[in-house]
Amino acid sequence: MLTATFRSVVAHKLRFLLTAASIALGVALLAGTLILTNTMGLAFEQLFGKIGSGTDAVVRTEAPYSATEGVGTTRGPIKASVLDRVSQVDGVRAAEGSVSGYALLTDNDGHAITTNGGAPTNGYSMPADEDLRGDVELLSGSAPTNAHEVAIDATSAEKNDIALGSTIDVLLQESTRPFTVVGTVGYGDGVKDLGGTTSAYFDTATAQKVLGNPGTFDSIDVSAEPGVSQTELASRLSAVLPQGTEAVTGATVAQENADATKANFSIVGIVFGAFAGIALFVGSFIIWNTFTMTVSQRSREIALLRAIGARRRQVMTSLLVEALVLGVAASAIGLGLGLAVAKGLKALMDAVGLALPFTALQVPASAIWLSFLVGTVVTVVASLVPARRATKVLPVEALRESTPGAEKPSRRRALLGVAVLGAGAGGMLANLYGGASFKVFGLGLLATMVGVMLALPSVVRPLASVVAAPLRMRGMAGELARQNATRNPRRTSATAAALMIGLTLVVSMGVFASSLKASFSDVISDDVNADLFVVTSSAQAPGFSPAVLGAVDGVAGVDKVSPSGWGEARFDGHGSSFSSVDPATASQIMGIDVSRGSAADLGKDGIVVAESAAKKHGWQVGDTITADFAASGEHNLHVVGLYDGKGWIGDDYVLSIAEQNAFAGPQLVSAAFLTLEPGADQAQVQDAVTAALGDHPDAKVVDQAGFEKEASGFIDQLLTFVTVMLLLAVVIALLGIVNTLALSVFERTRELGLLRAVGMTRGQVRAMVRWESAVIALIGAVSGAALGIGIGLALSQALKDEGIKAISIPVLQVTMYVVLAAAAGVVAAIGPARSAAKVDVLQAVTTE
Amino acid sequence: MSVITSTPRISSATAARVEGVTKLYGSGDAAVVALDDVSVGLGQGHFTAIMGPSGSGKSTLLHVLAGLDRPSSGEVFLGDTEITGLGDKRLTMLRRDRIGFIFQSFNLLPTMTAAENIVLPLRIAGRKPDPDWVDSIVATVGLSGRLSHRPAELSGGQQQRVAAARALASRPDIVFADEPTGALDSTSGAELLGFLRTAVTDLGQTVVMVTHDPTAASYADRVIFLADGRVVDEMHAATADEVLDHMKHLGA
């Protein structure tokens, strides 16, 4: 039996290759994802871990809870005086305070050196003790020793031709200052930057001053004398530390960093993993379809095997072994492609501005065994049903003269499909209007897709009549194409379903993104009363220096400047993001619709809460809630106002900027809203503000249209990213069309020969196959687009509370997808059409 | 115009003819001669049967005549058109517009009804069928009640009659039938042959049929005998018994 299996693999090389390709692409995405996440994980470890390698113990304040928050410190600062106490502890060889904060480098022309995506631009204190520097090493020049010197990462220096001795401006939290570049820094092993970030190094005293820690340190790094272990050192230090301070070993800190990295980074793996899952799911459809066709085409061969004594089990085993061989081969190819995919994904993320740290590609063992496992299991599982069907072939069928019959769409399956579809839609509606949880929505969404897939064979005929209507103009070839596409509805629907899934996802994302953009525009034009907007100069920068506000405020024609920021804290134990605003101007300019109380009363210990959150927790104006900040611990805040959640503010909590600075340390500004004095000319003021920002390359001023574009630009980038990822599923679906057509052409050899004998030209035959492909592709595309629009609208509706208030369908975009799908179908048909046209007429009509 | 034929009794108008046609399969020592310098003309308005034992080259001769196969040497004419050198496209159009086909089996597209199958070549050509003509053919083959059925719903004999109707629907210059009764029982076969006879006698069509069945051959005006790739004899208006006797004689 095994011989028969391998003979069959060899005999149908093309089919084998196409099927293998469909699963290999899915595996490639999976392997690429694993390789990429592993590589990036390593890059993050370098970013956090390398620097601390020479440190045996770290002294720091105890954190109320661990969280990262913007660019600020996550722990409270430690008093500089603690350093003296630490230095005197027995066994301490060296101890130095360490400081880090926001520092944006500029190039020789004063332009900001921006990083890819959201990679931070940091400033650090440079320890005088070389061991405490860890892997930080001077590649050229010397360490900074006074308030006018800086050392920068070698990548920034090389990319921007910054020579030693030249003077550059560095943008800091509070001000911009000129520094002389005295050295360039690397991180060992030829690494010249910390995972795509930029770094500025100052001597410790300067760092304290310019990074916002006068008189304090973020932490104190300690190096032990020889013979003193890390644990021993930490316990000796603990003995002398004041209340609220702790000493931990260097190993502990490294571990904490690694854990935090993993937590932050797992989302990337999950997102890519989801796309790989979709690709594999689509691939499994093709496997299933191919095996089903193979079984029906080989039924005579199988029947013959049965007639000469093969048992059912042997028939099934033979097919499953074929699937196994296919799965293993495809996984191997996929794994190889995975390396290229990892690079491609990285390039894609760079292109859309989602850059993350990166080093040389790392292929983890898990990528290898997972790829093989998943690829093989998916293939074998997808072939189970067809293999079972093969066992039902009766030996007597070997003697029957018959072409593989078309299976009628099953009524039961259609009814089941409609039922599942109804349940799914009901589930989604229950979430939208009945208060059911979002989980119900998710399940409903899934059920809707499954229902459509089940019912699809029954609507293939009517759908084909609709999408093939223009083919009437194409004469007999068009008519035959329509008939061929509908003669086996199950096969057509399985082929089209793969494309449908891809398109459903692409279109629903498109509708969702379009609604998001429309909502954003609505908010800006309806609720926000600003004329000009100051934003960061690169779209994903975390914010700009508060110093920018002073520069803008003085410009003639500018009436009010209302800055806003962002942070995270725990409110009565629940972690949440919050917005920070200027109490005097926020209500009016940002359109915060305060229904009770006033945002102007925020003061030093007030908080404004969204009505929905207040209702949930039972808070009223005048109540006191506990806010827990990572940097400073707990504070009691009074609820001074409630707002209805509309307008620019999307968070549930609003604080004043003064409060945020007090509780969480100095912060960057994310955006500032400007109003003009009466009679001022907007264009003139904009020019004047632009001029005033000349010394602040981290910020720029835009008008309302520009502001909308800034925000929607990011949505577009995300959408591009998602679409490109999903396109892979579409490509796999197209491979499925090629596969189905190739098998159909093979199956219809005699028919094609007959058509050619009675006068169909090769061109007409090619056209016939092409149009059939287009019809299949359109069935998938149209049903996918319809489903995608429905799901996109439902999703937008479901996220109404998250700020999606407008509904928008990108008609042009969706139309383009459908047309492109049809065109891709035509392209997919090139090969099969060619082989259909090459059919040997004589052989086809004379075969007995 | 002199027409080279192997017999003196032939009408001056030929629907198709071959001149010195040789067909080899394979090459070198392994070459098999399917047709060996055959010259024969097929009269217009005649029902001609080509007979011979297996491997005699009778099917090859039909395929060469119909433009489905190319001779290794020699010339093939359809009417006055020399088709030997025509490209695939011209040959295809020629088959579509001037030739009708009935094969032994698998004559019909399974997705189309009988009526659609009958006008298939016309539709491929983008021509409108002549309804009176099609009606008369359909009536003659006795398919009037079955036109909306698909091939799977028709008996073998009915399928072959649909094929015959299709072959005649475009009023071709010549109809080629390759063992049209080979897969039929004797009653169905007789019906089909009777129809072909009628098409020639009453409708003035030209039919050329390959068969190994003496009874089938007895419906023809003329029977051409092939052996080892050569035309060895012919008979006119022969009965089945006469054909059978003749075959025994040839085989002896």
Image: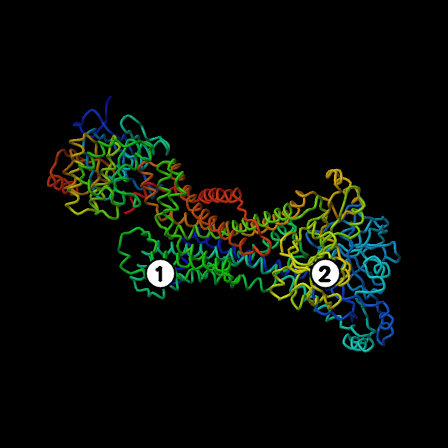
Residue that badge 2 annotates: A47
Q: Chain of mark 2?
A: A
Badge 2 amino acid: Leu
The tag on residue A389 is: 1
**Do callouts 1 and 2 mark residues in contact (Cβ within 8 Å)?**
no
| The quadrant where residue B126 appears | top left
Q: Which mark is residue A669?
A: none
- Badge 1 and badge 2 in a common chain: yes
Disc on the earlier residue, 1 or 2: 2
A180 left or right of A807 in image: right
| Image quadrant in which you'd find residue A690 | top right
Task: Find residue A391 and report its horizontal and vertical position in percent.
Answer: 34, 62
| Residue A351 vs residue A370, the one in the foreground | A351
Q: How far is the residue under mark 1 from the one under mark 2?
A: 55 Å
Numbered disc 1: what chain? Answer: A
Quarter of the image where the N terminus of chain A is located? bottom left
Q: Amino acid at mark 1?
A: Arg
Answer yes or no: is residue B244 visible.
Answer: yes
Depth check, front residue: A828 or A502? A502
Can residue A503 be seen here? no
Q: Secondary structure at mark 2?
A: helix
The image position of residue A306, as x and y in percent, is 31, 62
Q: Residue furthest top?
A: B1
Packing grade of label 1 (10 A; few <14, some 14-19, many >=20) is some
In the displayed structure image, the side of residue A657 where residue B70 appears, left or right: left
Residue at x-position 80% and y-position 42%: A556
- Image x and y of residue A70, in percent: 71, 59
Label 1: state its secondary structure: helix
Q: Position of residue A260 (x, y in %)?
A: 68, 65
User: Which of B73/A784 is in front?
Assistant: A784
